[in-house]
Image: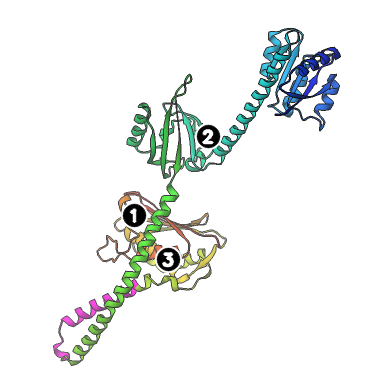
Amino acid sequence: MNQIKILLIEDDEEDFELFEDYLNEIDSREFDITWANSYKKAIEILQSEQNVFDIYIVDYLLGAYSGLDVCKIIKSANDSAPIILLTGKGNREIDNKASDMGISDFIVKSEINAIHLERSIRYSIKQAEILSALKVSESKYKAVLKQSKDIIFIADLSFNILSISDSVANSTGYAIAEVKKFRLLDLIIEEDKRQIIEKAILNQKSVYNLQFSLLNKSNEVRTAVITCNFQESYPYAEFVHGVIIDKTEEIKAEQSRLVFEKLDATARFMRTLAHEVRNPLSNIFLALEGMESEADPEDSSPYFPIIKRNSYRIDDIITKVLNSSQIEHKMFSKGNVVEQTKQVLKTIEDKIHLKGIKLITSFPEEDIVINLNEEQFALAISNILVNAVEALDGVAEAIIEVKISDNKIYIIDNGPGISKADQSLIFEPYFTKKSNGIGLGLASCINILKLHKIVLELDSDTGAGAAFILNLPSL
């Protein structure tokens, strides 16, 4: 700083001249001094465009007014402004008031000299610069905490929350005031994971990217990772700081990507295989027709029907394989999801009732329009419903619920559910636990939904029924 701009608020002209002399003695700095010789003049300057000073020096006594009143006005305009308060004599009460207001220094006039004044100005300006930098830094960190999608936290060694970012509500559903009422580790479902974290912090070590299951306010299980560190903070109490990152959507996206890659690779392989099988199969059909035409009708071989039946079955399987890999060639147009879902239910409703299953439906009055291939969309919904019907075999008071809400289609059953181990496999081609299935139903279903930009979620567990949730795209 080459030149320091000072506003001196002093109603005594002799004190002003003395103060000016002290400043002239300081050859290490250049000063530009503005003098306000009254409380009124000071207020005029502070409220004008002239109020651009590096430091304010204020006399405590300004006629009928107190210099502290002026200091309050200065601080209200610029909280980090450096202020030196001048008094006729030392007074601890005034000193304490000045400190509480954030005034940088307190000087007794009788003790002032050039050296003392230069040091006070220099320290006050430096202190103001540090305070300003701290406020800028604090503002940046607050912005990071507020805008971060990850949960940033500080807790004591028992994991009682001391501070946590606003993003906690996104993953947990809890407001900050609510989540502070329990331990952070209470969000973690797995007991062994809680023990790992507690043991690491007890031994003053860190935990890096530990994956765990998080139970939110709506009792929804989400997948997250935690990184946290023990922090020694002498002379204050030690604490734990860290971050929790919700990985649920990322993991779902990765699982979908892997399934789609498998579908694409399998489709390419099966198209090749189907064509290779269909050629000799055609020869078998021709040979069979020739043998039947030459055989005596009275003495027809019992093997002909077996060969024919299984040949047709092979041909049917080939057709399904080819159809499941050629969906991308179908045409799309705007269609009403609500109406299409109702139409699918009409085709399968009789089967549902014949099985003694109770059907519950709920649809919005307004249309939901997206780009559809109506035939293939109907096939996907039908496949999910058929799987639900078959899963309910032998279930007492079996129920299937189909509803559309919040731009989602829900197909829910109260059957035996799907184990966590099988959930990662059921959408893969040729995975099936049915004795008469080939495992292409749900595989082709997810391929159809992918082409419709519909994201499929599965919420299920053994003994807990199954909910297939179709997240519809916007048109």
Position of 64 with respect to 56 (left or right) is right
Compare marks 3 and 1 and give the one earlier in the sequence. Answer: 1
Based on the displayed image, in which of its 4 quarters is residue 110 positioned?
top right
Q: Which residues are magenta?
A: 296-321
Compare marks 2 and 3 and give the one earlier in the sequence. Answer: 2
Q: Nearer the viewer, residue 447 or 200?
A: 200
Tag 3 secondary structure: helix
Task: Name the mark on residue 176.
Answer: 2
Residue 263 included in the magenta stretch of the image? no
Let me know if residue 282 appears in the view.
yes
Q: CA distance from mark 2 to mark 3?
A: 41 Å
Q: Nearer the viewer, residue 171 or 300?
A: 171
Residue at image coords 78%, 23%: 7
Tell me: residue 222, above or below residue 290: above
Task: Name the mark on residue 424.
Answer: 1
Give amino acid for label 2: Ile
Residue at image coords 37%, 73%: 323
Q: Which residue is mark 3?
A: 448
Let me know if residue 346 appears in the view.
no
Q: Nearer the viewer, residue 32 or 47?
A: 32
Tag 1 secondary structure: loop
